[in-house]
Every structure is written in structure tokens, then in C-alpha cells.
Image (cartoon, helix red, strand yellow):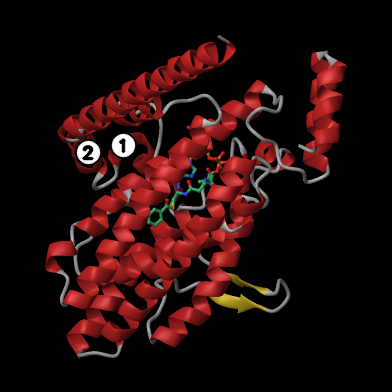
Amino acid sequence: MTGVTATATAAAGTDASYQAVFDAAVAADERIEPRDWMPEEYRSSLVRQMAQHAHSEIIGMQPEANWITRAPSLRRKAILMAKVQDEAGHGLYLYSAAETLGTGRDELLDKLHSGRQKYSSIFNYPTLTWADVGAIGWLVDGAAITNQVPLCRCSYGPYARAMVRICKEESFHQRQGYELLLALSQGTPDQHAMAQDAVNRWWWPSLMMFGPPDDESAHSAQSMTWKIKRHSNDELRQRFVDIAVGQAEGLGLTLPDPELRWNEERGHHDFGPIDWTEFWEVLKGNGPCNEQRITQRRRAHEEGAWVREAAASYATKHQTQRSRSQSQSQSQSQHANGEATA
Ligand code: BYC
């Protein structure tokens, strides 16, 4: 919020006037910052979405990391390692952004590990072949960019700023996936078939990433009023389909939907029905890899306990050293002042 509105907030003093200042800031496309007053539901909805987003980034490392040791060349291995590391970084930015709302990372991770918070449905599908790494880059990162570019204009400042850097990195991820699939598509007939098979398996789950249809989306209307979300789930899904059709042609691959066709009247592509039963089943924990992903995540957390302990004791040691040298220099300057006065 601007200095003027923040001052107005301080002067106003009642919940209703705080709310009015908040609403005016959102309406004026100003950013809400951590110390600004905000409705509790706005705070909790942001924590819910940002936590789910952060969890998706770190769980999303698993399906691709599965292929690091089997990448077909040093170049591909280096690219894949960089991408997976970027995803850990995205998780870090997002957990840090969520911390500005007063929710610590430990608490969020605990909710992920105990199944009280979600991560994206897409990461509950297996990566069966090397071509899946390309399909994830092209389709999953492509869907992520379509969804996340508007989040750079989210009303909550720390989330919006984190998204700017994340989107830049996601663009690189998407390009590497496209380039990988193009190489396979233009390779031997077996490689082409492998690329096509991966696209066939990842297409529909990628469309599900955008969330349930608008009429079943519990949070969309409120999130759009608050300008956390700028577009509805269906709008973004349609935008993604329209982009992907031309890109699939460029790749020489087809999308597995016989009903996919340009609709002149709508100015968009029509596409076939999404299997929402499958989506809700995956959300309930019944996808092909839910159990494997969460077990692996808990194990990684337990095995990383010594790193967190070491980092914490290192920080404590340096904090103690800093306080000691500060108090030493204070007493030296008091001593020096005393001598000067004497
Ligand atoms: N998976 O009211 P709705 C990435 C839940 S990309 C699981 O429409 P909302 C990456 C939803 O949480 C993926 N759950 O919700 C890419 C809600 O349940 P709760 C992460 C889903 O929030 C490549 C219920 O269904 N991206 O990280 O308005 C490599 C009703 O939904 C899903 C983000 O998280 C789903 N697909 O809209 C590595 C982007 N869809 O919470 C990593 C930020 C819906 O009431 N998030 N649900 O229990 C968003 O933009 C929005 O949260 C969503 C959902 C569009 C996903």
C-alpha cells in the first residue's frame, strides 16, 4: 500500500475502516505488503495457495530427478540438474514469501507430510521414459507459465515478486522440454513414438493442473475479487490449449484429443471432456504415485535433519560471536569515553 493509505489505515482505527482501506488498495491495483492490515480470510487463502504452490515445486523435483542418472548425454544431464535445482529454489522463494504472512516453513512442511495441505495433481503421474522429461518441460512447465504469469500481478507483494523470477526460469524449463521433444520427434521412428507416447500420457493431466471447472472452483470468485488470481481456471486452461495446438504442430506430434478443433465463432479451440473423476481421485490420494511421492518427501525431510541442525547451530554460533564482539566494542567505547571525560 502507499504511504498515504497506510497512514490512513493507522488513523482510522476500526475494522470497517481498515477493510475500506484494504479494498481501496486492491481496487487501485496497489500491492498489499506484509505489515499492512488484511482480512484474515485473505491471509489464510494466500497461505493455502502459496503453500500448495511451494509444495508442488519441491515434490515436482521427484519425477524428473528420477531421470538424472539416466540422461542420455552430459549436456542433457547438466540441463536437467539445473532445472531440478531451480525447482528447489522456487520452493524456497515461495516458502519465504509464505513466511511473511506469519506461517513458518516447519508448519507448512508438517502439513504437507501429514496430508493436510495439497500439492499439484500433476506430480502424481510416473515418468516412464526419457521423453517424459521433455513432455513435462513442454506441457507441465508450459501450463505452469500460463497459470503463473498473471500471478506476477497478484495483489500480495511478496508472492508477486517471487513469481517474476520463477516465471523467467519456467520459460527456460519450457524451452528445454520443447527442444528435447523436437530432437526425439525428428529422431528415429522409435524415438518419435516415445515422444508421442509421452505427450499422450501428459496431455490430459496437464489440463487438470488449472484446477476444477469454474462452476466447481471453491476459491476462484473470492480470489479474483482480491486479485490473488487474475483469471479463472477455465480461462487459463483455454489459453493453454490455444497455445499448445500450434506448438504440437511445430513438434510434428499430435495431441490425444479427437474433439480438438478450431472454433471460428469463439476464436478458440474446442476440446474434449476432461475426466474430472480422475482429477478428484488423484486429489484424494489415489493417483498412480501419490504414496510414493509423499513417502519419498518424508524420507528426504528426515534424512536432511542433520543439515537443518548444523545450519541452526552455525547460525547460533555466529549470532553469539556477533553479540559478544558488539558488547566488547560497546564497553571499549564506554571506557574510552570515560577516559576522555576524566
Ligand atoms: N492439484 O477452488 P479451486 C509447479 C484444489 S506447477 C491439486 O479452483 P484455487 C511446477 C484446490 O487447492 C503447479 N489440487 O482452487 C511445474 C482446492 O482445494 P483446497 C503448482 C488442486 O486455489 C513444473 C480445490 O482443488 N502451481 O509448481 O482457486 C515443475 C478447489 O480448487 C489443483 C500452483 O500452485 C491441482 N491441479 O485454484 C515443477 C500455482 N487444482 O485448497 C513445479 C498457484 C485445484 O480448498 N496456484 N486444486 O483444499 C493456483 O493458481 C491455484 O491454486 C490453482 C487452483 C489454479 C491451482
Q: Secondary structure at mark 1?
A: helix
**Of callouts 1 and 2, the N-terminal one:** 1
202 relative to 95 in the view: left or right: left
In terms of depth relative to the viewer, which is nearer, 246 or 302? Answer: 302
Q: Position of residue 100 (x, y in %)?
A: 54, 31
**Extreme residue in the front direction:** 342
Confirm whether residue 237 shows in the render: yes
Residue 216: percent from left, percent from top: 58, 41
Under 8 Å from ligand 1: the CB of mark 1?
A: no
What amino acid is labelled 2 in the image? Glu
Residue in the image at 77% along x and 39% along y: 26
Q: How many marks?
A: 2
Residue that carries the numbered disc 1 in the rendered image: 285
Amino acid on which disc 1 is placed? Gly
Q: Residue at 57% across / 72% down in the picture?
A: 242
Q: Is residue 134 above or below residue 288?
A: below
From this viewpoint, is residue 280 visible? Answer: no
Q: Position of residue 77 (x, y in %)?
A: 20, 70
Task: Determine which quarter of the picture holds residue 140.
Answer: bottom left
* Residue shown at 71% from the left, 71% from the top: 266
The part of the image, by quadrant, that contains residue 13 is top right
Residue 291: give x, y in percent of width and height: 22, 38
Q: Quadrant of the C terminus?
A: top right
- Residue at image x 48%, y 80%? 247
* Left/right of residue 317 with respect to residue 57 in the rendered view: left
Tell me whether circle 1 and circle 2 mark residues in contact (CB < 8 Å). Answer: yes
Front in this rendered view, residue 25 or 115? 25
Whether residue 27 sits left or right of residue 234 in the image: it is right
As drawn, is 9 to the left or to the right of 245? right
The residue to which callout 2 is attached is: 291
Neighbour class for label 1 at 10 Å: few (<14), some, many (≥20)? some
